[in-house]
Image (spheres, helix red, strand yellow):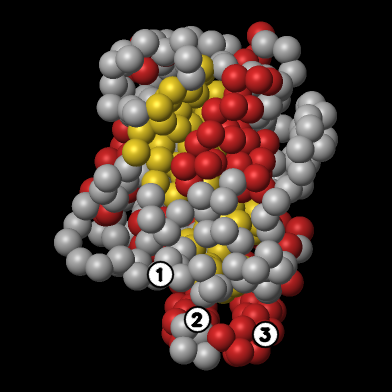
Amino acid sequence: MSTQYLTIPGAAEHAVLLSRPDWLFGAEHGVNSAGVAIGNEKIFTIDDPASSPPGLIGMDLVRLGLERAGSASDAVDVIGSLIETYGQGGTADLVTGEAYNSSFLICDPTEAWVVETSGRSWVAAAVHERTSISNRISTNDAWERSSAEIDPGSDFDLFRDPSRDTANADRRLAATRGFLERDGAVTLTTPLAILRDHGGTPGRVTDAPIPPRCATAGHDGVMTVCMHLPGDKATTSSMVAELPRDSETPLLGMASIGSPCVMPFLPFTLPRTGASALFPRSLGEARLWHHGALLRGAAESDARFVTAVRSLIDPIESELHGRLEELHSDPTQVATLIARADELMGVFLADSLRLLRRQ
């Protein structure tokens, strides 16, 4: 199997749905037909992958973990073994040429793990409550599994690069964990508000335009969950998935390409039998990403644009997400729902283009 920079033995065992940059083998996040979900974050450690020989990058490991693991625990073993065998190295950011180590949030219907890495070293901490990760080491000494050279009870924060400021990562981590720690049930649509968070009140997205400081280059702006730092950082895609405990029930989810504050979440489903995922055709089209970039630019130059484009998104999501929930009782309607999602996306593209022309 050819990864981004290496050829390694082994083959895929599970069907996957991935958010994959078009120049990479690997993926930012995804789910597989066994009900495993994995996402990764960039972290900076004392082991510099830029000075290492070509190895695996975090996005390789997301895809390989999903293709080869039948549970979250298995994915920890897969990723840990691959890191120990091949190490980490190689450009992972096409724009900056940057190489970096990664952390991973891995879950299935019954358990979840946080894996943090540095070179060929890694630790894994079981998740016992709702949690999130950001661009920083956070497990410290609360881990249960590791590569052999990590001493029992040691603090993985010793691997952190002290020259790297984690203030922005801290803000985003506090925002996501604060949202998850609130009381109440979490449904399939609950996470959308935090993915669209600009530092306002989650759930009131149209009342929270992009903060002015967030629309400036560099790291002196406000790093919100929905990232807007022109020339530096931007959210490129988002995914929410429901992982059913019943191994026969199809996995349901929603995905958005580009900045989620100005792009709708469309439904998808992944059968648990290994069959291919069913998702709107538009989610795989390059034009959707480019259109989303135009909308993000407009939102960054005029805070009122967020409210205007949300007025187009809200009725689309209201219809699609309501019908997505109904698939629990009538899964035969999947194809109809996917076709309707593509139809509504076509309408959204036309209507939002008219908004852009009025800017």
Q: Which numbered disc flags the more N-terminal residue, 2 or 1?
A: 1
How far, Cα to Cα, is label 2 from label 3?
A: 11 Å
- Could you tell me which residue is drawn at 29 percent across and 50 percent down? 130
| Residue found farthest to the left | 183
Q: Name the residue tied to disc 1.
A: 188
Q: Are marks 2 and 3 in contact (CB under 8 Å)?
A: no
* Circle on res. 211: none
Q: Name the residue tied to disc 2.
A: 324
Location of the N terminus (image quadrant): top right
Nearer-the-camera pick, 265 or 26:
26
Q: Is residue 157 left or right of residue 285?
A: left
How far, Cα to Cα, is label 3 from label 1?
A: 19 Å
Which amino acid does the dot numbered 2 rest on?
Answer: Leu
Q: Which numbered disc flags the more N-terminal residue, 2 or 3?
A: 2
Q: Name the residue tied to disc 3.
A: 335
Nearer-the-camera pick, 51 or 243:
243
Q: Do we see residue 94 in this rendering?
A: yes
x and y percent of residue 14 in the render? 67, 55
Count of labels in the image:
3
How far, Cα to Cα, is label 2 from label 1?
A: 9 Å
Q: Are marks 2 and 1 in contact (CB under 8 Å)?
A: yes
Nearer-the-camera pick, 274 or 159:
274
